Image (cartoon, rainbow, N blue to C red):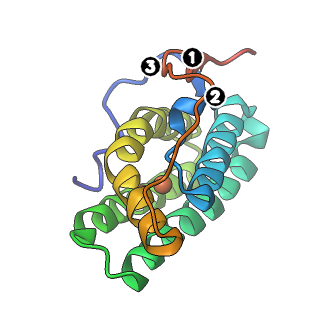
Amino acid sequence: MTTNALISPQAGVARTLVWTDAFLLGYGPLDDTHREFVEVVSALMQATDDELDGALARLECHLRDHFGTEDRWMEETDFPARQCHMDEHGAVLATLEQVKALCANGDVAIVRRFGDELIQWFPGHADYLDAALSHWMSKTRLGGKPVVLRRNLSFDETVIPVKK
Ligand SMILES: [Fe+2]
Ligand SMILES: [Fe+2]
């Protein structure tokens, strides 16, 4: 992934992300972090122009903590093939730095495009890379594969239009 991979050339219709149990992976601390991810991205997508700086700062704080924690878990437990997972986190953070610079120059649209790209990026990343980490952490820390109890299996309701 290049550092620009999260900024697509066309901005879509404004939309936001909502939590459903379809996102549950089974390792509690990881699921808690992902609930917070959905919350901060949703807040960013619903922020007014005046609120956008604060929402972006909160998103940055979340992403650094979220990715830093996952990277630390992988390092501490010697998770195999961790480099591609860590590289993907790094690519998102590199894009975030570009977005912050553009936002500081008055480009608020780029912040919403970044949020929109995160909405598209997250399910694939969670389903593929984070799910493997969740299984690994459950086995390493809890001694077994996670049992996931989902109340709603559908991803269909995770992305909804922003209400203005
Ligand atoms: Fe994650
Ligand atoms: Fe991850």
- Mark 1 vs 2: CB contact within 8 A: yes
Give the mark toward the camera: 3 or 2: 2
**Label placed on residue 18:** 2
Which residue occupies 48% across, 22% down?
155
Q: Nearer the viewer, residue 86 or 73?
A: 73
Where is 80 relative to 53, above or below?
below
Residue type at numbered disc 2: Val
Between label 1 and label 3, give the one nearer the viewer: 1
The amino acid sitting under disc 3 is: Gly
Q: Report if the CB atoms under discs 3 and 2 are less than 8 Å apart.
A: no
Give me the C-alpha separation between circle 1 and circle 3: 18 Å
What residue do we see at 67% from left, 49% from top?
36
Q: Earlier in the sequence, mark 1 or mark 3?
A: 3
Name the residue beneath numbered marker 1: 157
Mark 1 or mark 2: name the one nearer the start of the chain.
2
2 or 25: nearer the eye? Answer: 25
The image position of residue 79, as x and y in percent, is 31, 74
- The answer, for residue 56, to whether it is visible in the render is no
The Cα–Cα distance between marks 1 and 2, rounded to whole angstroms, is: 7 Å
Q: Residue at x 33, y 59 (%)?
A: 91
Type of residue at label 1? Answer: Glu
Residue carrying label 3 = 12
